[in-house]
Amino acid sequence: QRYRVSRRNVELEEAVRERTAELRQTQLEVIQRLAHATESRDQETGLHLERISRMCERVGLAMGMTPTDAETLRNASLLHDVGKIGIPDAVLLQAGELSDDDRQIMRRHTTVGGAILAGSSAPIMQMAEEIALTHHEHWDGSGYPRGLAGEEIPLAGRICAVCDVFDALLSERPYKEPWRVDDALAEL
């Protein structure tokens, strides 16, 4: 009887492991699909989200994050611009410099993204919400949406902000040529 119970416990544990892995894979697939939906609204950025996510993971590891936390950061950072889903095309796809009104509309992508991702009990989604809300905050407090400064900005948001700016500087955009790596590093 004990042998059967022990064997059944092993089978149940294996089934739980398999189901947990399947749920994790589904969660990552949904994140990637949502990220691709976001990116499809703005063709100018190319593979921006993939580059950002890889950089975030590497920076996280370099800053002492565990491999698990750095992987969570990599996946959560894919959703840093998910709030752009709620930005009108006339503003999001504008080729030139934004007016002050349009800039204010564009800045809403942080709070829209936070709202889309809010309320989850999953650590990856909690980090994604945190990143969406804080990846445009600046160390000196001049960022948005809340004007956080220094270490008030969560580490994941700070890492994503730096990687986002670095990638933007290196990328060609309708309004600018790509910067040289040395110049981008000096700017950071």
Image: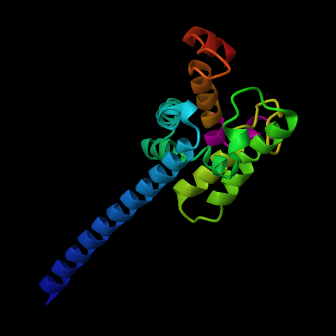
* Up/down of 121 relative to 137, above or below: below
Image vertical order of residue 104 relative to residue 97, above or below: below
Name of the residue lying farthest toward the front: 90
> Left of 49 or right of it: where is 141?
right
The answer to whether residue 75 of the structure is visible from this angle is yes
At which x and y percent is residue 139? 76, 31
The reply to whether the magenta stretch includes residue 56 is no
Q: Nearer the viewer, residue 69 or 126?
A: 126
Task: Please indicate, yes or no, whether residue 77 appears anywhere in the rendered image.
Answer: no
Q: Residue at x 79, y 31 (%)?
A: 98
Residue 185, position as x, y percentages in the image: 61, 15
Q: Farthest residue in the bottom direction?
A: 1
Residue at position x 13%, y 90% in the image: 1
Q: Position of residue 171 (x, y in %)?
A: 56, 22
Q: Nearer the viewer, residue 107 or 2?
A: 107
Residue 180 occupies quadrant: top right
Instruction: Residue 160: name its quadrant.
Output: top right
Q: How is the structure coloured here? A: rainbow
* Main SS class of the magenta portion in the image: helix
Q: Name which residue lies at 55% across and 12% down.
A: 181
Q: Does residue 51 appear left or right of residue 163 in this picture?
A: left
Image coordinates of residue 50 in percent, x first then y, are 47, 36
Q: Single out the residue that lies furthest toward the right.
A: 100
Q: Is residue 16 above or below residue 86?
A: below
Question: Residue 151 in magenta?
Answer: yes
Q: Which residues are magenta?
A: 148-158
Quadrant in which the C terminus is drawn = top right
